[in-house]
Image (tube, helix red, strand yellow):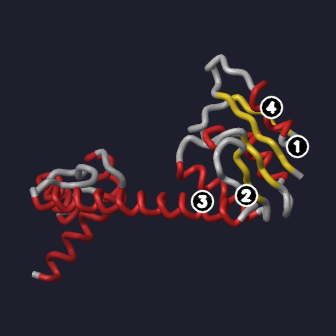
Amino acid sequence: MQIGYARVSRGDHQDLDAQVAALAAAGCDPILREEASGGQTDRPELARAIRSLQPGDVLVVWKLDRLSRSLRDLLFTLEEVAAAGAGFRSLTEAVDTTTPAGRLMTQTLGAFAEFERAMIRERTMSGLAHARQAGRLLGRRPSLTRQQRAEIVAKAESGQGSPAQLASLFRVSRSTVQRVLRDHRNRSAVA
């Protein structure tokens, strides 16, 4: 069975008629229609189409961008289709996973996506290393200053409050106070 999926973006004043006509001419039945952004992950009709796929079925779209706006999302969707034992076909692009050439095209898209993810990771790691070398502190700002940490230790050692009371006083969580005290004990034990 060929299951058609037609989508237009909400509010773009587009209609589905051209897509539905092309999908019907290709022999799709049923044809699921959706009005949602391609970048939106919550597309109930697409999810319904994928859930209804049986081994040997083919999910058909008019153009790839009707299925997804990002390569990553496209590949994720194609993995779901393949996991159902079904194929995928785009009527206007040369993507048809029911043929050897179409599977090659899909694998090529996957290789480019993997390469893109690796390059992004490499640039991110390089940027973080450069920031560390420049002396920038990364991550969240500490919730307590060095002076506040010292005050917590002094008050706890002199019995002027429990971790819960100190947490309330310094407006942090009890686990933060306990971490400060544990770090102090560990440093004292090493010294």
Q: Earlier in the sequence, mark 3 or mark 4?
A: 4
Which residue is tagged 3? 105
Residue flagged by tag 1: what amino acid is it? Gly
Q: In the image shown, does 122 or 156 lie closer to the viewer?
A: 122
Q: Earlier in the sequence, mark 3 or mark 2?
A: 2
32 to the left or right of 7: right
Determine contact: label 2, label 1, CB under 8 Å.
Answer: no
- What is the C-alpha distance between the residues marked 2 and 1? 19 Å
Q: Quadrant of residue 138?
A: bottom left
Determine contact: label 3, label 4, CB under 8 Å.
Answer: no
Question: Picture coordinates of residue 149 (x, y %)?
Answer: 18, 57
Residue 20, numbered label: 4
- What is the C-alpha distance between the residues marked 2 and 4? 21 Å
Residue that extends furthest to the bottom in the rendered view of this protein: 190
Q: In the image shown, does 126 or 163 lie closer to the viewer?
A: 126
Instruction: Determine crowd level at label 3: few under 14, some 14-19, many 20+ residues with C-alpha closer than 10 A.
Output: some
- What is the C-alpha distance between the residues marked 3 and 1? 23 Å
Instruction: Quadrant for the C terminus, please.
Output: bottom left
Q: Earlier in the sequence, mark 1 or mark 4?
A: 4
Question: Picture coordinates of residue 48 (x, y %)?
Answer: 79, 45
Label 3 residue SS: helix
Which residue is tagged 1? 27
Q: In the image shown, does 18 or 190 lie closer to the viewer?
A: 18
Which residue is tagged 2? 81
106 to the left or right of 81: left
Determine contact: label 3, label 1, CB under 8 Å.
Answer: no
Residue 61, numbered label: none
